[in-house]
Amino acid sequence: MDTSAAAIEWTLSELLKHPEVMKKVQNELAKVVGMDRMVEESDLESLEYLNMVIKETLRLHPVAPLLIPHQAMDECMVNGFFIPKNSQVLINAFAIGRDQHAWTDADKFIPERFAGTNIDIRGHDFQLIPFGSGRRSCPGIQLGLIVVRLLVAQLMHCFHWKLPSDMLPSELDMTEEFGIVVSRANLLYALPSLRLHK
C-alpha cells in the first residue's frame, strides 16, 4: 500500500503545483460523472485526462525507481555495453522516465504529451515502465492503478484544493526521499473545501 499512497501523494502534489491541470481534471469529472454523485470504478476508463495525469505522474515519480533485478541469460550487447552471462541487471525507471531522448521537456509535468498516443503504462512500451515489464513486472498493476485513479478522482471530484498559508504553487517543495519507495521528503499539506453538491 505504500507504493499506492506515494503515487497518490505525488499526483496530488503535481496537481497542486499545476492548478490549470487540476482545473482540467475537475472539469472532466464534472462532465463525465456530473456533480450529483461520487466517482465509481466504472467511470475510470472514461476519464481520459485523469489517466494522462496519472501516467505523467508515474513517469516523473515512479514510486519504485529501481526495478527488480534481471539476470542476463546469455552474454549480449546493449547500447554498446557488453553484458556478461548471469549478470544482475537493474533497470532504472526513474532515468527512463526523464530521458531527454525519449521525452520532450522531460523534466516538466505535461499530461497532454499522452494525448493521441497509445503508450501503455503496464510495461508494453519501454519508455514508460513504472511497474516493470515482462515476467518480473509488478503483480499488483491492476489493483494499484484502480486504487490510485479512483482515490485521486474522488479527491478531485469532491473537493477544491489549495495550499496553506497563501503558498504559491511554485513554492511547493517537491524534494524526493529515496528508498525502496520514493516518497516526498516533506509531507504534503493542502486545504480542502467541498465541491460536490451532494
Image (cartoon, rainbow, N blue to C red):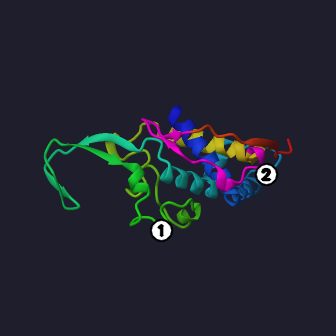
Amino acid type, label 1:
Thr
Residue 12 % position (x, y):
64, 46
Q: Is residue 12 visible?
A: yes
Residue 2 % position (x, y):
52, 32
Indicate which disc, 2 or 1, sits on the residue closer to the N terminus.
2
Q: Quadrant of residue 82?
A: bottom left
Which residue: 13% across, 48% down? 84
- The stretch of residues the image draws in magenta is 164-185
Q: Nearer the viewer, residue 171 or 22?
A: 171
Residue 51 % position (x, y):
59, 53
Which residue: 36% across, 48% down? 92
Q: Is residue 160 visible?
A: no
Horizontally, is 9 left or right of 139 in the view?
right
Q: Quadrant of the C terminus?
A: top right
Q: Nearer the viewer, residue 41 or 110?
A: 110
Q: Which residue is mark 1?
A: 104
